[in-house]
Amino acid sequence: MKDNYVDRAKNALCGNCIYYVSKGANNLLGRCRRNAPVTVKGYPVVFPTDWCGEHKLDETKMIERAE
């Protein structure tokens, strides 16, 4: 029996997430805006290829990349 979830998280990367905000023109770094800042005194810096369990696909970013 084939596993229906084998490729589920393949595109669940920070760069495709609704909570990801790019920092800089080259899109190599960004900030995760999922939770309010706490002890780090700011939003965590993440790479677009990072991932987390809170991912939520931002369809507009997927459309921009497809064009």
Image (cartoon, grey):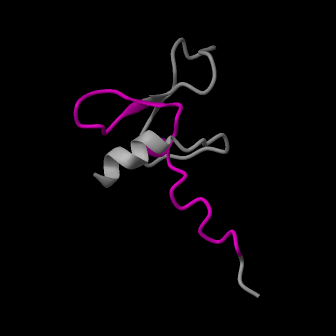
Q: In which quarter of the image is residue 61?
A: top left
Residue 43 position within the rendered picture, expressed as x and y whole percent measured from the top left: 52, 21
The answer to whether residue 48 shows anywhere in this view is: no
Residue at 42% from the left image edge and 48% from the top image edge: 62
Is 66 in front, or is 56?
66
Is 19 in front, or is 48?
19
Residue at 55% from the left image edge and 44% from the top image edge: 57
Tell me: residue 28, above or below residue 37.
below
Residue 6 position within the rendered picture, expressed as x and y whole percent measured from the top left: 64, 72
Residue 22 position within the rendered picture, expressed as x and y whole percent measured from the top left: 36, 31
Tell me: residue 32, above or below residue 60.
above
Residue at 66% from the left image edge and 40% from the top image edge: 54
Q: Quadrant of the N terminus?
A: bottom right
Is 45 in front, or is 25?
25
Residue at 33% from the left image edge and 27% from the top image edge: 23
Overall secondary structure of the magenta section: loop
Residue range in magenta is 4-30
Residue 27 position within the rendered picture, expressed as x and y whole percent measured from the top left: 30, 37
Residue situated furthest right in the rendering:
1
Residue 10 belongs to magenta span: yes
Residue 27 belongs to magenta span: yes
